[in-house]
Amino acid sequence: MPDFPIRKIAVVTEEIFHDGGPAPAAPRRRAAALAVVKNPFAGRYAADLESAMEDLKPLGLMLTDRLIAALGGDIKAIDAYGKGAIVGSDGELEHGALWHVPGGYAMRERLGEAKAIVPSAKKVGGFGTRLDVPLGHINAAYVRSHFDAMEVGLSDGPRPDEILFCLAMACGPRIHNRMGGLRAEDIKAWDGLR
């Protein structure tokens, strides 16, 4: 059972009041929760990685709970999500893929079994590396008004033997969205991938 000791956690919140046009009735809110953890696979090749995803589920739940709190605690207001990972230079890209199940599972569980795939990004990088974490609607992947990204990163990580795992959520569509497509209010029960 791999161990992923946490070195640091950060929660970043944003309120977007306008994007060059008229201010909406309420700002759009976005938040990201990041955890920098020790990479137990750094510096070596391990054939079996998949079983380690189970060990990361508590971290996914903890970061999800912090995100929900940072966005005001009302899960009905949260309608976009995404996840990402930055693997330190002694690791490999596949170590970032360890986050697929724990990150997605945690957000779906806490948000009430959201139906859409959780958009994801990962890369290998060093101190100060930034990552654009993609965001999409929680119940239908084709809701264009919610296509977005939140840039994340920390100045002191990840170290070569660490991984930075991130979850991100948002409340509401992009400010001034007007690109058409499936509207959030028109989502049907099983539109998850539509």
Image (tube, grey):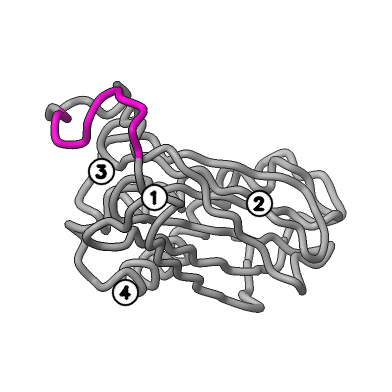
Q: Residue 31, position in %: x, y?
A: 43, 64
Q: Which residue is mark 2?
A: 131
Q: Residue 19, position in %: x, y?
A: 44, 52
Discs 4, 2 touching: Cβ within 8 Å: no
Q: Tag 1's secondary structure?
A: loop
Could you say which disc has been placed on residue 178 in the image?
Answer: none
Q: Give the alpha-carbon distance from disc 4 to disc 1, as whole Å.
A: 29 Å
Amino acid found under the numbered disc labelled 2:
Leu
Q: Tag 4's secondary structure?
A: helix
Q: Earlier in the sequence, mark 3 or mark 4?
A: 4
Would residue 68 be counted in the magenta stretch? no
Q: Which residue is mark 4?
A: 69
- Residue 100 visible in the snapshot: no
Discs 3, 4 touching: Cβ within 8 Å: no
Left or right of 2, for residue 29: left
Q: Give the alpha-carbon distance from disc 2 to disc 1, as whole Å.
A: 27 Å
Q: Tag 2's secondary structure?
A: strand
Dot 2: few (<14), some (14–19), or many (≥20) neighbours within 10 Å?
A: many
Q: Earlier in the sequence, mark 4 or mark 2?
A: 4
Amino acid found under the numbered disc labelled 3:
Ala
Closest to the camera, between mark 3 and mark 4, is: 4
Q: Earlier in the sequence, mark 3 or mark 1?
A: 1
